[in-house]
Image (cartoon, rainbow, N blue to C red):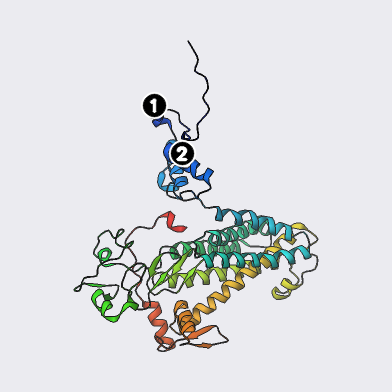
Amino acid sequence: MKRERFKPPQPDDPLCCCGDIDQQREYCCCDCEELDDACERLLRGEPDKPDIISRFISRMADRLGLPCCAIGPLRLELSVLPPMVLIPGLLRVAAINCMLGFVVLTALPGLVLWYYYVTHKRKRRTLFFLSLALFSLAYMYYLFLTEIVPRGDVSNLQLVTATTGMMLTLISIVRTKQGPGFVKSQSLALGINNSSTTNQSTNLPRDSTPCNGISQSKGEKEGKKKLCPVCQLVHPPRAGHCRICGACVLRMDHHCVWINSCVGQANHRQFILTLLLFLLTSFYGISLVLRSICPRQSLFTAMLYCPGVYSQYSTALCFTCVWYSVIITAGLLHLFIIQIINVSYNVTEREAQIALRNKTGRRRFCGLVVETGVYSRSFLQNWIQFLTMNTDENDSPFTFTEMV
């Protein structure tokens, strides 16, 4: 029998991993047409489709007998990996001596702020900051269990308190991620699928039912300021369009990169509760660590001067992590104070920026708050309105993919 000579692949031949796809379809772990398309785009230097990796993971999960809902819909992003590598590496390098610690702890916030400026300028979503927050919290807790608890200076009650604070913080983050409260179109409010109408302009009927607290016909009469030029939806008062999320948010405050989501009417209270829980847990954890590695110093003095802390690498690492936690806590404390003042004056961060741009607001408390005087009544009434505002969200169940 004559053997067929090997024929080199031609430029137009598709790349396939499964040979005869008709005979081996049930044993193939991927879609060869999509893989061919991905390889050709990779060779041409074109960006890949974001859902190919998730489909490949879903197919592998089916072959391995794993539930698809657990990992199938997830999309792998490279932005979640740098914090997992940089945080342990940089903190351990900073623990070698005092000068390295000063350089690393000074450069690290600068790098984070630079990356925030780049992503914010390009209006891109990224999981870097959410991954940095979650992994930093997990890594600090890991060092607390492996370096501080074995020293015997932490009682069982203190350990349970710190663990409870961390768990409550994580649960609060998950609840904050459930959604900021998006502006619903008329068809979505009536229970009709509106996936096609939100991507193109929608003809607004004259006699329309109220949606989001304002009628569509009334919004047309009030002018174009109530109509979103991107989503083509009529805005209720204080709603805004987020260019990063690509959606309109009810009572939009700002887009928070630390939770990779907007802060709006449905999750604003939960967002402030998350900040409060994190700050309390962080302050309590910092106090426990300083009392363990610097028992003879007061808490404030121990952060600035702790003799003999670099004599052992374990204590130096804990001291470095304390300063890293102090930097993060200080930044979030500043955000928490701004949020409290804004609620007291019944102004959102978006409204403050618009007021400054239009020169219709006044800066108070050294620029921490911008008073617009539009919705503010009194301190008590502002807080009552904030604590009792409607937070009804879509009736869709919360899934694990909403965490990212």
**Farthest residue, direction front:** 11
Taking the image as shown, residue 328 lies to the left or right of residue 102, namely left
Q: Residue at x 25, y 60 (%)?
A: 192
- Residue located beneath label 2 in the image: 36
Using the rendered view, name the quadrant where residue 110 is placed. bottom right
* Real-space Cα separation, disc 1 to disc 2, in angstroms: 18 Å
At a point 60% along the width and 55% down the height, the residue shown is: 82
Tell me which numbered mark, 1 or 2, is placed earlier along the sequence.
Answer: 1
Say if residue 151 shows up in the picture.
no
Give the camera-side residue of 365 and 154.
Answer: 365
Q: Is residue 377 left or right of residue 217?
A: right
Q: What residue is at 41 percent from the left and 84 percent from the top?
A: 382
What residue is at 44 percent from the left and 74 percent from the top? Answer: 253
Q: Mark 1, mark 2: which one is toward the viewer?
A: 2
Quick one: label 2, few (<14), some, or many (20+) residues within 10 Å?
some
Q: Which mark is residue 23?
A: 1
Name the residue at the top extreme. Answer: 1
Residue 62 left/right relative to 95:
left
Can residue 178 be seen by looking at this rendering? yes
Dot 2: what SS? Answer: helix
As rendered, which of 129 and 152 lies closer to the eye?
129
Q: Please tell me in which quadrant of the rendered image residue 155 appears.
A: bottom right
Q: Is residue 373 above or below residue 145?
A: below
Q: Disc 1, disc 2: CB below 8 Å?
A: no
Neighbourhood count class around disc 1 (C-alpha, 10 Å): few under 14, some 14–19, many 20 upward: few
Residue 70 position, x and y percent, is 43, 48
Label placed on residue 346: none
Query: Mark 2 is on which residue type?
Result: Asp
- Give the SS element for disc 1: helix
Residue 238 point in image, percent of width and height: 38, 78
Q: How many marks?
A: 2
